[in-house]
Image (spheres, coloured by chain):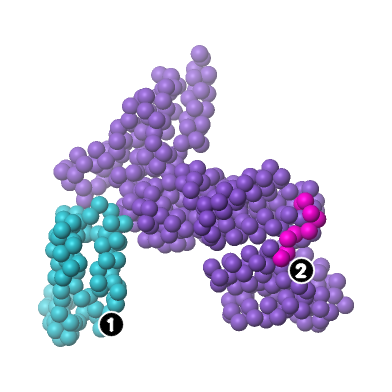
Amino acid sequence: MTKQEGDWLAHSTADAVARRSYGKLVAFVAARTRDVAAAEDALSEAFAAALDDWPRNGCPKNPEAWLVTVARRKFLDTVRANRREITTDNLEDTADAIESISESEEIPDRRLGLMFACAHPAIESGIRAPLMLQAVLDFDAATIASAFLISPATMGQRLVRAKTKIRQAGIPLRIPDRTELRGRLDTVLDAIYAAFAEGWSDAVGSDLARRDLAEEAIYLCRLVAQLLPNEPEGLGLLSLMLHAEARRSARRNAQGKYVPLAEQDPALWNTQMIAEAESLLYRASAIGSVGRFQLEAAIQSAHVARRRTGQANWTAIVALYDALLLLSGSPVAEVNRALAIAESQGARAAITALDAAAADARLAEYQPYWAARADVLARLGAHDEARHAYDIAIGLEKDVSVRSFLDQRRGLLT
Amino acid sequence: MAYTEALKQAGALKGSNRLQPTATATTVRTVDGKQQVLDGPYADTKEQLGGYYLIEVADLDAALSWAARCPGSQHGTVEVRPIWAM
């Protein structure tokens, strides 16, 4: 092998390990020390050492074990050099705190434990999703910052603060006990969904970092579904996100204009993703414990029924929103329910439902409420009122292509 | 008290004290090298620190589950904080 080939092999092996196992390595190294930041630092040094060592000495048989061994040594060096609060006494404990691993061993997968730490209720809720993306998937702070529309410096600080909290408060990197699992899993799923929603808001996929975010959220949820196969809400969230992702390319037309769900061409939907989403939802429902994500996935499922029957199952959609409202009391669910009522029972019933929903003051600043109101009023022939509602909806919308869609609808009024 | 007994039984209890109301408090401060003694509490707030338990457990989740069992958590708030390792 020439030197060039050796270099190339070392780099591509390191790349592959990083992609496949980064989160697994961080979770393993930080498992007992709870020092996520130090684990990340030690691993990045270990990767650098690998790129120096592997071209000369050949790639090890078990690159993960090699990296963990080196990271463990680097970690101890750092502790010795920097941590005044750690005395020689517990330095020995620290040494034991990272297990050594032999060439022949598989590294145990503790990524889920790491995710539970990142989404612990003791961590500020807004930083849970970014923290997970960084610790499990190796996203850098700048990329996360741009996806969450926060300045890179602020994002960096908040990530550091969260990692310090994990270490200092003693947040465990493990899957909670049976009794607490359901409640705590909700915070993990919420964080995954938050990451997905950030990716989803960029419909055209013009912003690569954001589109990746939706895919990575699906990846994280696959991990949850795989490691906790009997938790119905994990399956429900995965089903929900796959349903949404399946329609991504149908959300904009060839000119980049916004296309509402009702006008999308079902032929553009990804049938394979829909099939997987449907089977996940079926598996979740068989477990027999309904939750928010399963209901939202079921609503998606009733929408895509249009693919086979030419019509969404509006009666089912209204019933599912009723159930969702009982669970969450969310005014957003109330608006969507009103739109389903418009389809199944007519515009007059829908406007009554929207009037009732308007009791919640939060809706005054919620674009979809005003757009829904405008649409229903237009169907009732109340064009002046509809125009007014469109004006407010347009004023509240950030996305240019949605704004021009609303503007075009407004132009149809007489 | 049953809670303290349970903590002892679990081998988690390292110490505890109940504090008398803040009306009994006297505050000391050193300003520019000069000692100042003030009557009354450090901060005049509605909430008062009523006492503390010093416990030793594996991690935050274990500490939180003990905090949730503390009778004080039903009518007040229990704040959980790590101590500095000496």
Marks 2 and 1, how far apart at CA: 55 Å
Which chain is depicted purple? Answer: A
- Residue assigned mark 1: B45
Q: Position of residue B27 (x, y in %)?
A: 15, 80
x 37%, y 56%: residue: A179
Along the line of sight, the residue nearer the viewer: A88 or A325: A325
Q: Residues within 10 Å of mark 1 (few under 14, many from 20)?
A: few
User: Is residue A104 visible to the viewer in this orientation of the structure?
Assistant: yes
Chain under numbered label 2? A
Q: From which residue to which does the magenta span run?
A: A307-315
Residue A296 sits above or below residue A361 on the image: above
Q: Chain of mark 1?
A: B
Q: What residue sits 77% from the left and 48% below the top? A: A268
Does residue A328 appear left or right of residue A162 in this picture? right
Determine which quarter of the picture holds residue A62.
top left
Name the kind of residue labelled 2 in the image: Glu
Q: Are marks 2 and 1 on the same chain?
A: no
Q: Position of residue A382 (x, y in %)?
A: 81, 81
Q: Nearer the viewer, residue A371 or A2?
A: A371
Name the colour assigned to chain B in the rendering: cyan
The residue that disc 2 covers is A343
Label 2: few (<14), some or many (≥20) within 10 Å? some
Amino acid type, label 1: Thr
Q: Is residue A212 visible?
A: no
Front-lying residue, A44 or A216 = A216
Residue positioned most to the top: A1
